[in-house]
Amino acid sequence: MVVIMKRAFTPEELQAAIQTMEEGGVQVMVSKGSETTILGAEGNAAGIDQEKLSLLPGVDRVMRVSEPYKKANRKYHPDNTAVDLGGGALVGDQRLAVIAGPCSVEGEDQIVGIAQAVQHSGAAALRGGAYKPRTSPYAFQGLAQEGIKLLQEAKAATGLPIVTEIMSTDNIEMFEMCVDVIQVGARNMQNFDLLKQLGKTSKPILLKRGLSSTIEEWLMSAEYIMAGGNTQVILCERGIRTFETFTRNTLDLSAVLAVKQLSHLPVVVDPSHACGKAWMVERMSLAAIAAGADGLIVEVHNDPKNALCDGAQSITPDDFDHLMRQLKVLAPCVGRSL
Ligand code: PEP
Ligand code: MN
């Protein structure tokens, strides 16, 4: 942190600024130029009350020079982190990890059938929502606990670890017992109470980027989870809101590169929610892997036209098989395998 003093300040005002910084736990370096006096913080500036400091009479500006996230920051953890999805399937190492399955669990035949199909094509984990964050309260809300039970049946039939979304802190204990990876949806990316509680769990967290969240806000949400002790966080770029309406969202592939540079955490891309159109999923998946994503999370449905949620963006098991074959061809070109 750097503090720039006003052109004219009293010795008392300088002392007040230094004291406020020192109280925040840093050492202060004072650099007096002919025009400007600058105070530099040495050490971790996280404890400094930036607002209080900037309101002091002698202070002109306060500038942050390092990122506010520490545990998620590559500076303090240069090596890539690989997260175990369950049963040894890693995301974040050389091998790509593809998570696939329907938007929502709808019934036993549906989820078990899709699980078998995506496993056959090489998926590393099964996704499926049991608690659905729907825009309309009248839309299908998910099968809730029954959906979790059906996911467990699909896991028993295939061995695939299960990834499913949590919406309420009330379900944390049950999720910790029953699922392999807990998904935090875009709408809950800044549900700080939920993030704090998930920080105390032992399960990996798939953290989706919020609908209109900046990269820094997204990494700060990861920091919330990690600050609680749970360092197994997988970031998921799922498209952001822009002025464009042709696609459901705008897939921000540059965010994949940004986050890989800023953080050591693994990053997956969700082309389904990003585009909202099944016919775009394969090409956007390939683009995501070319951009450096560690994997994908893709919606696959046996009967997209009659899906209870997100049918328009769901690809069929045959399409998924084709996508996986294409990925196998692409992977070695970017130093990965599948
Ligand atoms: C989902 O994965 O089905 C979902 C609701 O995604 P998002 O939170 O990215 O909208
Ligand atoms: Mn969905």
Image: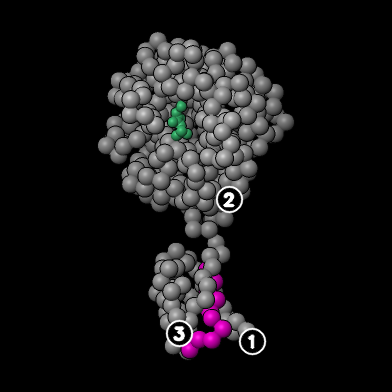
**Pointer 2 or 3: first along the chain:** 3
Instruction: Provide the residue designation for mark 1.
Output: 34
> Which quarter of the picture shows residue 271?
top right
Q: Amino acid at mark 2?
A: Leu
Q: Amino acid at mark 1?
A: Ser
Task: Give me the residue at 48% from left, 66% from top.
Answer: 44
Instruction: Provide the residue designation for mark 3.
Output: 13
Q: Is residue 2 magenta?
A: yes
**Pointer 3 or 1: first along the chain:** 3
Query: How far across and how far down the image is residue 251, in percent?
Result: 59, 36
Q: Residues within 10 Å of mark 1 (few under 14, many from 20)?
A: few
**Pointer 1 or 2: first along the chain:** 1
As drawn, the label of residue 262 is 2
Instruction: For marks 2 and 3, give the CA distance.
Output: 36 Å
Query: How far across and how far down the image is residue 124, in percent?
Result: 52, 25
Query: How far across and how far down the image is residue 17, in percent?
Result: 45, 79
- Give the residue at the far left of this rendering: 170
Between 31 and 335, the one lying in front of the other is 31
Instruction: For marks 1 and 2, give the CA distance.
Output: 36 Å
Magenta segment, prevailing SS (helix, strand or loop): loop
Residues shaded magenta? 1-10
Task: Give me the residue at 67% from left, 21% from top.
Answer: 326
214 vs 125: above or below: below
Circle 2: element type: helix
> Mark 1, mark 2: which one is toward the viewer?
1
Task: Give me the residue at 42% from left, 13% from top.
Answer: 110
Circle 3: element type: helix
Q: Residues within 10 Å of mark 2 (few under 14, many from 20)?
A: some
> Which quarter of the picture shows residue 161?
top left
Q: Is residue 332 left or right of residue 31?
A: right
Query: How far across and how far down the image is residue 267, in percent?
Result: 55, 39
Q: Is mark 2 within 8 Å of ligand 1?
A: no
